[in-house]
Image: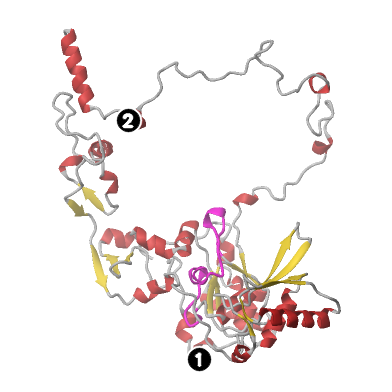
Amino acid sequence: MATVWRSRCAFAPLLVGKSVRILNNTIDLGSKLIPKPLSVTLCAKDYSSYGKSPFVDKITERYDYEIIKNPPEWEYVKRLLPLDIIPKVTPKDNYPSGWIPPKEEAQNLPYFIRRTKHHEIPIYLNLTYRGTRKVTKIKKLDGDIWLLNHEIKKYLNSTQQRYVETRVHELARFIEVKGDFVTVLKEWAYSKGF
Amino acid sequence: MGSRQIAEKSLSILRSLPRISLGNIRDNPGSKITQKRGRGQHGGDKHGAGNKGGGQRQNYMRLGYETGNNPFYLRVPHENYYKGHHHRRQYPPLSLKELQLTIDKNRVDITKPIDIASLVRSGVYNFNPDQKHYGINLTDEGADIFQAKLNIEVQWASEEVIAAIEKNGGVITTAYYDPHSLFLLKNPKKFFETGQAIPRRMIPPSDAIEYYTNPETRGYLADPEQISQARLKLAQKYGYQLNNIQNDSIYNMLCERKDPRQIFFGLEPGWVINLKDECILKPKDEKLLSFYAI
């Protein structure tokens, strides 16, 4: 029997263009699988293109199964599906990781730093010229950007004991500070409540 | 057979054969000439040695060659420490600090058991099973600040990490997944959309069996009684009070484990998940049930 079946299968891809689409669970015992004598003169069927080959039908299920609608296990499936949106952070008593939520009082300041979609402060270090030039970039700024620049300069002058160069981009709303001050500026932003 | 019959027969053959297209033609034999490297006076011109001078006349030997001596670089016996490193299992790290940050930002739900699928879903962890990555190595950075009480399943953990999690009343298991299962865990939606039945998880290879049956590493194949003894032993070593899980309000969650043959929580091998109609296809056939038996 096995040999007969194998010989049938051997012709299947030749004869039926769409037989590769048969599912694992099914066998197609339709007429198309049975090899017909390939007579050159009496060849009525035209298998020259994919579009002309007939569809697979008469599929019989080989294995028995049941379909369960609204299954209780669907909760486990939901847990595996990707998140549609980044979840909001619920207020907690403490955040052991050191992350600090934005405070209400920061809304009253004449300037504002918005959080990123990942609830982080948008202060980054840009390294150029093989890491020799370090520039700290503060993004997502609102309000009086020049006043913010003035305050940052004053704060860095007092903490770093030296003059610190900055660059204000009014149109793209960012400030660049020459040097690596990411942690210092993040602490300052947290203290302001951003 | 006359020539007329031959012509008719070949025409009928042509009719039954597929139409000539770009996909099934090839060049006439002999129409393409491949260039050969000539060796004659001008055919093989310079042979890469440049024009005149030392390049052509001197013999620049290969690097390290000592004109027939046993070369220096071969004279010293060599131990290849990294031999076969590209075949070894790799576990890309995830620190306890990063895990705590994801919990603080509500990216993972600690009221449910956490496994590699939920951590990849949160976006904090990524790995490539095709690059011999076999899952999470939970590292001890931030072990002092870690405060979450959870039921976590990772692929590799050190003693400090196990102590940090059990100190906070949590439970940790180390479990092995074969690369095929890891592909499913990395992107379960993609797998469900293919309409295939969830496969069985494979057992660990012979060199990993020891780690995953060891109660001290909280292996998933270890004896649960020995694990509880090892928990007590570790608590005494690190000097903390062990949480009594039996009296806990979240006892059921903390006890939830996967079967050694199971890939996803709550979903058994052999099931087909239909995301479009939100239904599950469960096998009833004896043959399938025995094939997917846990």
Give the residue at x 30% y 70%: B278
Looking at the image, is mark 2 or mark 1 earlier in the sequence?
2
Per the image, label 1 sits on a secondary structure element best described as helix
> Dividing the image into 4 quarters, which one contains the C terminus of chain A?
bottom right
Q: Chain of mark 1?
A: B
Q: Foreground residue, B105 or B116?
A: B105
Q: Amino acid at mark 2?
A: Ser
Which secondary structure class fits the magenta region best? loop
Q: Specify the segment rendered in magenta.
A: B109-135
Which residue carries the number 1 mark?
B247
Q: Chain of mark 2?
A: B
Which residue carries the number 2 mark?
B21
> Dividing the image into 4 quarters, which one contains the N terminus of chain A?
top left
Res B52 seen here? yes
Q: Quadrant of residue A104?
A: bottom right
Q: Is residue B103 left or right of residue A52?
A: right
Q: Is residue B205 above or below residue B49?
A: below
Residue sitting farthest toward the top: B2
**Mark 2 residue crowding within 10 angstroms, few (<14) / some (14–19) / many (20+):** few
